[in-house]
Image (cartoon, rainbow, N blue to C red):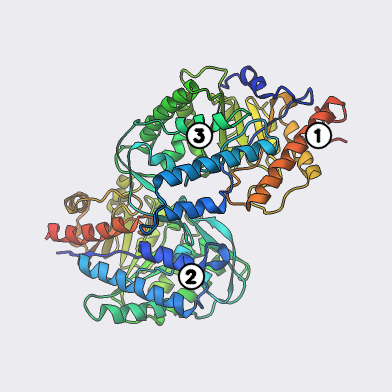
C-alpha cells in the first residue's frame, strides 16, 4: 500500500504584515532586494515569518514541513542571487507569469554558500521534532536556465557546475526526510534532443548528495515523452513530481503508462496559481482518477502537492490550500 | 478591420491651431499624484483622523482639476485627469464590476505587490465606472477629454479566474461590459476612448482573443468616436500585422524605451490605423530636449503620414517625479508644433522623414 504524504515545496507568500514591514525596511527597487547579508532588523522579520510558516503547516497537519522560503525574493533563483560569485542583472520575467526576478549572472567559480542550510537549521529548531523536514532547492537544470553564464563557457559545463554547487549545499543541510528539486524549466524550455542526459546527470549529482527521498518536481504541464523516460531512468529521483492541474493531464498519464515511473510519485493536485480552493474530496478524486489509470499501489509513496510554488496566492488562500492537501490524505484513508 | 480614423480626428484640432499640419498630441493616462493626495488617501484610513470619505472625494476633485489644467498648460490637444481617482489599473475596475472579490496582495517582484482580484461568479454591470469622472473632467477642461479604460483581456488575465471554464470566456463577458460603459461614456459626451491592454504584450499569441474582445467593445459605437488601443513593453512583431484587423482608430505604442528599433516592424505591410507614437520615455527621470523629441517624432513619419500620426509619451507617467512628467509633456507638445511647422514649410520630407 502506498504511503500518502501531504507536502509542499514551499516558496510561500509573505504574510501581509511582513509584506509591509519588509518593504519598509528593504525598499522597492532592484538594489533593495536580498543579498544574503541582511541587517539584524530584517533577519528578525524573517525569523517571525519562518515561525508563522511552520505553525501554518503544523496547524494544517502536513506530513512534511518546509522552511517556506520567505527570503527568496528571486523565487527559485535565490540560491544564486545571494551568492558571492554572482552579480545580479536586470529584472526578467519568471516563466510565463506576471512575476519577475533579478537575472543572476554567474561571474566566478560557484563555491559553497550555506545560505539555504542556515535557513533549514532555523526551521529545524522551530519544528522541534513535531514533523519531518522537507528541504527545497531549484533543480540544476532550471537554475541554469534561469541564470546567465559569464564564467563556465558552455551549457553542459554550466549545468554541471550548478549541480556541484547545489550538491555542496545539500551536504550541509540538517537532517531532512525529503528534498524537493524544483524543475519547471524541464517543461517550459526542455533540453535539446540528445542533451537530456546532461540535464539528468546534473539532477543525479544533486540527488546523490542526500539520503532523503528526492522529489524532482515539474510544473506547467506534461513533460515530453523522451525527457520523461530519461528522468525516470537517470535522474536519481525517488519521485518525479507531475503537474495534474496545468496543461493536458492525459499526456502525463500516457507518459507513466508508457514509460513506467519512479519508485514513488508526486502529484501536483492543488492549483498554486488560482485562488479557488479545492475541496479535499476533489483532490482525493484526482488522486483516484490518476490511480485508476496507473497502479499507484505500486508506488512506495504518493506525495500530494500543489502544482507550483504557492507565492502566487494571497496569504489567506495559501493557508486554505495547505489545509486542503492535509485533509485530502485523510479522505483517502 | 480598422475603423475610420479620418472621420473623428479633426474634431480634436483646436480652433487656434497654428499650423496646417496637425499632429494630435495626447497622453496615455496616468500622471504623478500630488504628494498631498497620497497623504489624503492614507488619512482617510486612519480611525483617529476626522478626515472622512467626503473630504477625500473633495481632494480627488481638486487633484483632477489641477492635473487636467496642468495638461492644458502643457498645451496638449486632448487631456485626461491623470487618473487621480484610480489606484491600480485592474483593481480600480475590479472594484466596480460585480463578480470580482479581493483576497489580499500578491507579489509581482521583490516587495512590489498588487491586489490581484479573483473572479468568483459571472461578471455583471452595476453602476457606471467612469461616467462621473468623465463628466467632472469634461466640465473643468477646455480641451477634449480622453478616457483610458483597462481592457477586458487585461482585466481577465490579470485576475484569478475561479468562475469561468476558460479565461477567454471571461474576457468576452468583460468586453460586453466595457461596451456598455463606452456607450454610457459616449452618451455623456466622450469622443476619445483608449483601451489599455498591457497583458497582450506578455502573451502575444492571444492576439485573436483581443481582436474578438475589441469587436464586442466597439459594437454599436459611432465612427465619430475615436477608439485607441494601447499596448506597451513587448515584441510588437508578434502582433503585427494582425493589429491591422482590429476595429480601432488608433494603435498606441511604446517605442522610445527601445530607441525605436521596432519601427521597421510597422512599415510592411502598410500600417492601417492611426499611429500614436510614444516619443518620451516613461521610465527615465530626465526631460528629453525638444530637439531629441523632434527626431523621435520623425520616426513615426516612417510609418504613417502626418495626418495619421498622434504624439504621446510611451506609457503612463505616474512613476516619475511630477516636474519631470510636466517637463516631458510640455517639451513633447513644443516638439510636435515645431515639426508641424517644418512640415508646412516643406523642411521635412514626409516621404523620407529622417533626411534633413
Q: Secondary structure at mark 3?
A: helix
Q: How many marks?
A: 3
Q: Which residue is mark 2?
A: A25
* Residue annotated with mark 1: B338
Residue B83 makes an appearance in the image:
no
Quadrant location, the C terminus of chain B: top right
Identify the residue at horizontal 69%, vertical 39% (top origin): B74
The image shows residue A64 at horizontal and vertical percentages of: 26, 70
Same chain, labels 2 and 3: no
Q: Foreground residue, B96 or A225?
A: B96
Q: Give the Cα separation between the discs numbered 1 and 2.
A: 47 Å
Provide the residue designation for mark 3. B207
Q: Residue drawn 40% across and 68% down?
A: A70
**Tag 1 secondary structure:** helix
Instruction: Name the foreground residue: A20 vs A327.
Output: A20
Contact check, label 2 and label 3, Cβ < 8 Å: no
Give the chain of mark 1: B
Q: Position of residue B128 (x, y in %)?
A: 40, 30
Relative depth, front residue between A304 and B352: B352
2 vs 3, front mark:
2
User: Residue at 42% of width from left, 52% of height from top?
Assistant: B51
Amino acid at each position: 500500500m502506498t504511503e500518502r504524504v501531504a507536502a509542499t515545496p514551499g516558496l510561500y507568500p509573505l504574510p501581509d504584515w511582513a509584506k509591509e514591514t519588509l518593504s519598509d525596511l528593504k525598499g522597492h527597487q532592484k538594489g533593495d532586494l536580498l543579498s544574503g547579508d541582511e541587517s539584524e532588523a530584517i533577519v528578525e522579520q524573517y525569523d517571525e515569518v519562518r515561525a508563522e510558516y511552520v505553525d501554518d503547516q503544523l496547524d494544517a497537519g502536513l506530513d512534511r514541513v518546509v522552511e517556506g522560503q520567505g527570503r527568496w525574493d528571486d523565487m527559485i533563483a535565490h540560491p544564486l542571487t545571494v551568492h558571492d560569485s554572482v552579480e545580479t542583472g536586470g529584472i526578467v520575467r519568471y516563466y510565463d507569469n506576471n512575476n519577475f526576478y533579478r537575472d543572476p549572472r554567474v561571474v566566478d567559480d560557484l563555491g559553497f554558500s550555506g545560505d539555504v542550510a542556515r535557513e533549514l537549521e532555523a526551521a529545524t529548531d522551530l519544528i522541534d521534532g513535531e514533523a519531518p523536514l522537507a528541504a527545497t532547492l531549484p533543480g540544476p537544470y532550471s537554475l541554469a536556465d534561469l541564470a546567465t553564464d559569464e564564467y563556465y563557457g558552455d551549457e553542459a559545463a554550466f549545468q554541471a557546475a550548478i549541480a556541484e554547487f547545489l550538491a555542496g549545499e545539500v551536504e550541509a543541510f540538517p537532517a531532512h526526510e525529503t528534498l524537493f528539486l524544483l524543475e519547471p524549466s524541464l517543461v517550459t524550455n526542455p533540453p535539446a534532443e540528445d542533451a537530456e542526459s546532461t540535464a539528468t546527470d546534473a539532477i543525479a549529482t544533486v540527488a546523490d548528495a542526500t539520503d532523503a527521498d528526492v522529489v524532482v518536481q515539474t510544473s506547467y504541464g506534461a513533460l515530453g515523452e523522451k525527457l520523461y523516460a530519461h528522468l525516470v531512468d537517470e535522474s536519481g529521483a525517488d519521485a518525479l513530481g507531475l503537474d495534474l492541474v496545468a496543461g493536458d493531464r492525459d499526456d502525463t498519464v500516457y507518459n507513466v503508462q508508457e514509460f513506467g515511473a519512479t519508485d514513488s510519485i508526486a502529484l501536483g493536485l492543488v492549483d498554486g496559481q488560482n485562488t479557488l480552493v479545492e475541496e479535499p474530496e476533489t483532490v482525493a478524486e484526482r488522486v483516484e482518477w490518476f490511480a485508476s489509470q496507473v497502479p499507484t499501489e505500486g508506488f512506495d509513496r504518493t506525495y500530494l502537492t500543489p502544482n507550483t510554488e504557492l507565492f502566487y496566492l494571497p496569504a489567506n488562500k495559501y493557508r486554505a490550500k495547505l489545509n486542503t492537501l492535509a485533509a485530502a490524505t485523510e479522505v483517502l484513508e | 478591420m480598422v475603423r475610420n480614423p479620418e472621420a473623428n480626428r479633426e474634431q480634436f484640432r483646436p480652433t487656434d491651431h497654428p499650423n496646417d499640419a496637425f499632429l494630435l498630441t495626447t497622453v496615455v493616462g496616468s500622471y504623478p499624484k500630488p504628494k498631498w493626495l497620497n497623504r489624503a488617501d492614507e488619512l482617510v484610513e486612519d480611525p483617529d483622523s476626522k478626515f472622512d470619505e467626503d473630504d477625500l472625494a473633495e481632494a480627488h476633485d481638486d487633484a483632477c482639476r489641477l492635473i487636467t489644467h496642468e495638461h492644458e498648460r502643457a498645451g496638449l490637444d486632448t487631456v485626461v485627469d491623470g487618473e487621480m481617482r484610480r489606484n491600480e489599473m485592474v483593481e480600480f475596475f475590479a472594484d466596480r464590476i460585480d463578480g470580482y472579490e479581493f483576497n489580499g496582495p500578491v507579489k509581482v517582484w521583490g516587495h512590489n505587490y498588487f491586489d490581484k482580484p479573483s473572479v468568483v461568479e459571472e461578471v455583471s454591470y452595476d453602476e457606471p465606472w467612469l461616467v462621473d469622472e468623465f463628466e467632472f473632467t469634461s466640465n473643468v477642461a477646455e480641451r477634449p477629454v480622453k478616457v483610458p479604460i483597462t481592457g477586458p483581456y487585461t482585466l481577465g488575465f490579470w485576475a484569478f479566474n475561479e468562475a469561468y471554464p476558460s479565461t477567454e470566456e471571461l474576457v468576452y463577458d468583460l468586453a460586453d461590459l466595457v461596451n456598455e460603459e463606452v456607450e454610457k461614456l459616449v452618451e455623456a459626451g466622450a469622443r476619445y476612448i483608449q483601451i489599455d491592454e498591457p497583458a497582450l504584450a506578455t502573451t502575444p499569441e492571444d492576439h485573436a482573443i483581443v481582436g474578438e474582445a475589441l469587436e464586442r467593445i466597439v459594437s454599436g459605437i459611432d465612427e465619430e468616436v475615436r477608439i485607441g488601443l494601447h499596448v506597451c513593453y513587448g515584441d510588437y512583431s508578434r502582433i503585427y500585422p494582425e493589429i491591422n484587423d482590429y476595429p480601432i482608430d488608433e494603435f498606441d505604442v511604446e517605442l522610445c524605451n527601445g530607441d525605436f528599433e521596432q519601427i521597421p516592424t510597422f512599415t510592411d505591410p502598410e500600417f492601417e490605423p492611426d499611429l500614436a507614437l510614444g516619443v518620451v520615455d516613461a521610465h527615465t527621470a530626465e526631460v528629453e530636449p525638444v530637439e531629441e523629441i523632434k527626431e523621435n517624432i520623425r520616426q513615426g513619419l516612417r510609418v504613417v503620414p502626418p495626418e495619421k500620426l498622434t504624439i504621446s509619451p510611451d506609457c503612463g507617467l505616474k512613476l516619475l517625479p511630477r516636474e519631470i512628467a510636466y517637463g516631458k509633456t510640455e517639451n513633447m507638445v513644443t516638439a510636435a508644433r515645431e515639426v508641424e511647422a517644418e512640415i508646412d514649410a516643406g523642411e521635412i520630407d514626409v516621404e523620407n522623414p529622417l533626411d534633413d
